[in-house]
Amino acid sequence: MSGKLSTHVLDTVHGCPARNMEIELWAIASIGQKQLVKTLYTNNDGRTDELLLNENEIKVGIYEICFYVSDYFKGYALSLPQPSFLTVVPVRFGIADASDRYHVPLLVSPWAYSTYRGS
């Protein structure tokens, strides 16, 4: 099995994939030290056109995906306070086996989010 990391963002307010949301993937070297791996945007299906990490890039370690939810929801005619309750949703997780497949979905609204390890 080839290791990989992917994501999928679902907008729970509108009941649809979150299109054109900015996502940053960070590698966490140690407490307080992060290195930007890549910046991607979700497509019309709420996924990225390329993997966050492909089989040649994935390594054992700690990672963080930052989802720019406030910028995404500003594109809709919602009456939201400024600053927004959720601005950036960071999801920090570990990859223990670089040959495994990791999928990190995000279900999000301007006020709440949920994530889990998908398949």
Image (cartoon, helix red, strand yellow):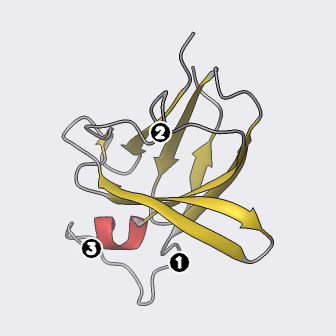
Residue 23, which numbered label? none
Q: Give how far across and how far down residue 77 sits, in percent.
A: 20, 70
The answer to whether the residues at label 1 and label 2 have Cβ atoms under 8 Å apart is: no
Q: Residue at x 56, y 37 (%)?
A: 58
Distance from Cα at disc 3 to Cα at disc 2: 28 Å
Q: Residue at x 61, y 43 (%)?
A: 115
Residue 74, which numbered label? 3
Secondary structure beneath label 1: loop
- Rate crowding at label 3 as few (under 14), some (14 to 19) or many (20 or more) other CA atoms within 10 Å: few
Residue 85, which numbered label? 1
Residue that lies at the very extreme toward the right in this rendered image: 31
Query: Which sits earlier in the primary sequence, circle 1 or circle 3?
Result: 3
Amino acid type, callout 2: Leu
Distance from Cα at disc 1 to Cα at disc 2: 30 Å
Q: Quadrant of the N terminus?
A: top right
Amino acid type, callout 1: Phe
Q: Give how far across and how far down residue 26 sits, in percent.
A: 55, 61
**What residue would you read off at disc 2?**
53
Quadrant for residue 27, please give it. bottom right
Secondary structure beneath label 2: loop
Distance from Cα at disc 1 to Cα at disc 3: 12 Å
Query: Which sits earlier in the primary sequence, circle 1 or circle 2?
Result: 2
Q: Nearer the viewer, mark 1 or mark 2?
A: 2
Q: Residue at x 44, y 32 (%)?
A: 54
Which of 72/76 is in front? 72
Amino acid type, callout 3: Lys
Q: Give how far across and how far down residue 70 sits, in percent.
A: 39, 72
Q: Nearer the viewer, mark 3 or mark 2?
A: 2
